[in-house]
Image (cartoon, helix red, strand yellow):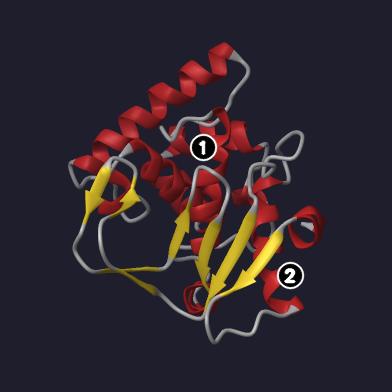
């Protein structure tokens, strides 16, 4: 959390007042998903841009890896493989108002940064142990295919079926924000995420859902 707060460049979107409270909330949420990981898992994050609310995208852009669009779109967050992360403060506050629904923008965008640590945005973050990596891929692939078919239950919505990178980000949101629900709906997925993150949030006192 301290590294993110004091060793990264923070920028404010037009008309937004960036203060220590905003930095603290975002850094604390990001740190929560990284606390069980080795080294500095957000070492590739170069800057964090905070907007007041969603941003209107115009012209040709790639919101989701491999999908380029020139249609006008509103986005709450973006995570660039080269380091910058963009977040909507309004969306973050809404997530905090409704804990336990399995949605959290900060978890989502920083999960992309973890995924991209090996230079690939493919839904598989660096996992040194070969057997654990194979198990992770097998379980996540099976759950991803359910999401593609619209059978991901409440925790893996249709956005999880866009591509494997978005699947990992959505699954990370559910793992930390609705751990008991994810464990009930996708037990094996919960277990491989628990092994990777080095955490078992469903066992925490007061765990949501």
Left or right position of 207 against 31: left
Q: Quadrant of residue 76?
A: bottom left
| Residue in the image at 67% along x and 45% along y | 42
Q: Picture coordinates of residue 28 (x, y %)?
A: 71, 62
Count of picture labels? 2
In the rendered image, residue 137, in percent from the top left (x then y), is placed at 42, 24
The residue carrying mark 1 is: 115
Q: Return the disc, 1 or 2, that comes first in the chain's sequence.
A: 2
- Residue in the image at 63% along x and 38% along y: 197
User: At which x and y percent is residue 82?
Assistant: 54, 44
Q: Could you tell me residue 80's position as x and y percent? A: 49, 49
Q: Please indicate whether residue 202 sits to the left or right of residue 148 in the image.
A: right
Specify whether residue 45 is in view: yes
Circle 1 packing at 10 Å, graded few (<14), some (14-19), many (20+), is many
The residue pinned by badge 2 equals 24
Residue at x-position 63% and y-position 48%: 45
Q: Nearer the viewer, residue 127 or 121?
A: 121
Q: Cα distance, mark 1 to mark 2? A: 23 Å
Kindly state the secondary structure of the residue where label 2 is placed: helix
């Amino acid at each position: 959390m301290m590294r993110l707060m004091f060793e990264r460049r923070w920028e404010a979107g037009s008309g937004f007042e960036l203060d220590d409270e905003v930095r603290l909330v975002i850094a604390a949420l990001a740190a929560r998903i990284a606390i069980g990981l080795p080294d500095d898992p957000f070492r590739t994050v170069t800057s964090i841009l905070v907007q007041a609310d969603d941003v209107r995208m115009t012209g040709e852009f790639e919101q989701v890896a491999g999908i380029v669009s020139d249609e006008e779109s509103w986005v709450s967050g973006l995570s660039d493989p080269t380091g910058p992360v963009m977040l909507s403060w309004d969306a973050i506050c809404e997530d905090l108002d409704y804990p336990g629904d399995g949605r959290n923008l900060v978890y989502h965008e920083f999960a992309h940064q973890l995924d991209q640590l090996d230079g690939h945005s493919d839904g598989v973050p660096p996992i040194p142990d070969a057997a654990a990596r194979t198990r992770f891929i097998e379980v996540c692939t099976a759950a991803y295919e359910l999401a593609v078919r619209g059978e991901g239950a409440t925790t893996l919505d249709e956005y999880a079926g866009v591509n494997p990178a978005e699947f990992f980000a959505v699954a990370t949101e559910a793992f930390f924000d609705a751990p008991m629900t994810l464990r009930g709906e996708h037990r094996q997925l919960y277990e491989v995420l628990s092994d990777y993150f080095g955490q078992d949030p469903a066992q925490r006192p007061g765990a949501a859902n």
